[in-house]
Amino acid sequence: MFVKAGGLALVALGLDPIFLTRAAYAVKRRTGPANRTKTLVCLFQRGAVDGLNMVVPHGDPFYYRERPRIAIPRPGAAFGALDLDGHFGLHPVLAPLKPLYDNGSLAIVHAVGSPEATRSHFDAQDYMESGTPGLKSTRDGWLNRYLAARHAREHQETPFRGVAIGPQLPRALRGSAPALAIDNLQAFGLRAPEPARDRLTRAFEELYQGSATGLVATSSEEAFEAVKMLKALNPQRYQPANGAQYPPGPLGRSLRQIAQLIKADLGLEIAFADVGGWDTHVNQGATEGQLAARLTEFGRALAAFTQDLGERMADVVVLTMSEFGRTVAENGNVGTDHGHATAMFVLGGGVRGGRVYGDWPTLDPAKRFEGRDLAVTTDFRDLFSEVVTRHLGAADPRAVFPGYANPKARGVIPG
């Protein structure tokens, strides 16, 4: 069953919209630090981010040989990489994230990706979201399997355990457990002007009155009552705090809304947001250009999110992901083509940061995947399993990643 009204998309597989009423009880119960929920925020960099320019292996001599026009200058040069450990550095526009690395709340995993060799965006994204690389028959996503396996009895306590910011539910959150897709949190009344609230009211009334939905009137009334109760929450509590300033753009808006949901104490365990624009085949640029523009918003948005939540980041982990990386060598269009391994960020108060994790395979042509790409030395399921077990508390990662029996923890999150 899929219900869409105004800026709100509600997906509840196997449940009646009456489940929204339980949000009211969640609001009352989940207050105070003792009742805070551990939250995982997943950011999908769709299009395959160039991990070699995002987290620069400036200590690998092949990097500069293969990228004469798009390489990020060495640390110490004008607009050079921000050195992390003598071998790796951040793209200079990611300067807002450097203090988080230095204070130990940001970890980076390099040469991470899927064991599946596909260079298809569609297939690689599907495998990463299903959590079963190479297997197309998997119906549900790994985040939904977590929701189904972990605290199954809580499905009826709050509908806000799994939330995607966007117009539709991503593959990773589809499955038997209830999850929400929220295109615009203002439709709930948080910072929404009166005309928007009026449109939402009319949308619910038009949806349920006289429509062939198979829903009884009492269900629609209770669902709408839950939305009204959410709107009754004090909007000032959810403004960006601690001087945080989110950048304009989709990612800044998404992270701002996720922060609002976390601060509202609705029992949010999984949040998901997409950020596109990483498929840089042409005119990728180096310290300026297409990739630098995307990374600028990326770094500023993550830094603002961390500043906004403040002490609440102790209960939050942000995990970034991308379906694959880019080729080691730049192409004839001053860009990069579809590759294999990339870099992923893990950010949060419980993260053992200040390190670049993973086994670096070098960019030596003899060590590259298929002679052209950074090889995968960390299966993405190893990293994802570590996050769901050590941060979220899942007892058995095999329930989340079926067919993957022995994930190897990197120690990004203390065990």
Image (spheres, rainbow, N blue to C red):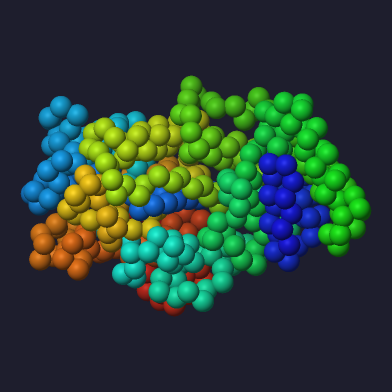
96 w.r.t. 25: above or below: above
Whether residue 344 is visible to the viewer of this picture, yes or no, is: no
Left or right of 123? Residue 85 is left
Residue at 85% over, 46% down: 206
Residue 316 in picture, x, y percent from top left = 49, 45
244 w.r.t. 373: above or below: above
Residue at 78% over, 35% down: 199
Residue 127 in picture, x, y percent from top left = 44, 67
Residue at 53% over, 50% down: 272
227 w.r.t. 357: above or below: above
Residue 57 in picture, x, y percent from top left = 17, 47
Q: Specify the farthest residue to the top.
A: 243
Residue at 42% over, 37% down: 302
Residue toward you, 62 or 272: 62
Residue toward you, 194 or 360: 194
Q: How many labels, in total?
A: 0
The N terminus: image quadrant: bottom right
Whether residue 260 is visible to the viewer of this picture, yes or no, is: yes
The C terminus: image quadrant: bottom left
Residue 115 in picture, x, y percent from top left = 32, 69
Left or right of 294? Residue 60 is left
352 w.r.t. 173: above or below: above
